[in-house]
């Protein structure tokens, strides 16, 4: 076989990218498939959280006074701080994606670390809120729910708190999973895995992180600000 033939075969089969999976033709196809897979996953998450929020709203309509009373017991300032923190984390995540697209290794690492930091701040604030609620006797349960400032509304307030801990707890679990993934992505970014040709994982991680932030954007007014409509002030 001549040298010309060897070069022709080499041109037909470009070097295999180390992160290209064998069942894809090229990185573009792999990127599209990965993105579609993440959107399908997020669709199931929307249905999941949407169902819980619908159930919450049904009881809100059934027990408006109790819902307003329970929401007034929430520390809306802490909720607002966490909302700001997550919005900033979405910005740093977007900047991490952009840095990976441009092949800026340290920029990607720094933005991912900042995203992880803001996620940690969010979880810390939420842990503080949980601690306060527990000491105030607002944790649902026969032995733990001891709030009786308004005995007539106490059962419905406990129901609200059950929704509160369920929804914010599920959200926090998603945040913890996201934090674990960020640690892995920081390690990969540090060793230079991502660049203009291969940045899909960071982009897909961004989709997940933005979704978790959007869920909180719904939870914040539902759980902290609904008392405004009921005329209560916390």
Image: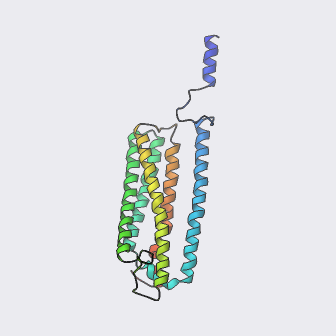
Q: Nearer the viewer, residue 104 or 184?
A: 184
Q: Name the residue at 56% across, 69% down.
A: 52
Does residue 12 appear to the left or right of 118 in the view shown? right
Work out which residue is located at the far front of the displayed protein and give it: 143
Q: Nearer the viewer, residue 131 or 115?
A: 131
The image's colour scheme reads rainbow
Residue 226 in sight here? no
Q: Quadrant of residue 70?
A: bottom left
Q: Position of residue 69 (x, y in %)?
A: 44, 82
Q: Position of residue 143 (x, y in %)?
A: 41, 77
Q: Quadrant of the N terminus?
A: top right
- Label count reads 0
Q: Nearer the viewer, residue 151 or 123?
A: 151
Q: Is residue 91 above or below residue 171?
A: above
Q: Name the residue at 47% across, 72% down.
A: 164
Q: Position of residue 71 (x, y in %)?
A: 44, 78
Work out which residue is located at the far top of the displayed protein and give it: 2
Does residue 33 appear to the left or right of 177 in the view shown? right
Q: Name the residue at 51% across, 38% down.
A: 198
Q: Name the residue at 42% across, 56% down.
A: 89
Q: Position of residue 17 (x, y in %)?
A: 54, 32
Residue 170 in sight here? yes
Q: Quadrant of the C terminus?
A: bottom left
Q: Is residue 39 above or below residue 185?
A: below
């Amino acid at each position: 076989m001549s040298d010309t033939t060897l070069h022709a075969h080499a041109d037909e089969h470009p070097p295999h990218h180390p992160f290209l999976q064998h069942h894809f033709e090229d990185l573009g196809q792999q990127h599209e498939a990965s993105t579609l897979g993440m959107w399908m996953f997020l669709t199931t998450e929307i249905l999941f959280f949407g169902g819980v929020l619908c159930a919450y709203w049904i009881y809100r309509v059934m027990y408006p006074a109790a819902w307003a009373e329970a929401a007034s017991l929430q520390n809306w300032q802490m909720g607002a701080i966490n909302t700001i923190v997550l919005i900033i984390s979405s910005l740093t995540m977007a900047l991490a994606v952009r840095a990976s697209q441009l092949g800026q290794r340290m920029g990607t690492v720094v933005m991912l670390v900042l995203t992880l930091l803001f996620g940690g701040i969010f979880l810390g604030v939420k842990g503080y809120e949980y601690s306060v609620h527990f000491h105030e006797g607002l944790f649902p349960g026969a032995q733990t729910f001891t709030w009786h400032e308004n005995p007539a509304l106490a059962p419905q307030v406990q129901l609200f708190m059950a929704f509160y801990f369920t929804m914010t707890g599920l959200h926090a679990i998603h945040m913890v999973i996201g934090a674990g993934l960020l640690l892995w992505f920081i390690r990969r970014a540090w060793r230079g895995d991502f660049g203009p040709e291969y940045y899909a994982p960071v982009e897909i991680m961004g989709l997940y992180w933005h979704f978790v932030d959007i869920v909180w954007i719904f939870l914040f007014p539902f759980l902290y600000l609904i008392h405004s409509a009921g005329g209560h002030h916390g």
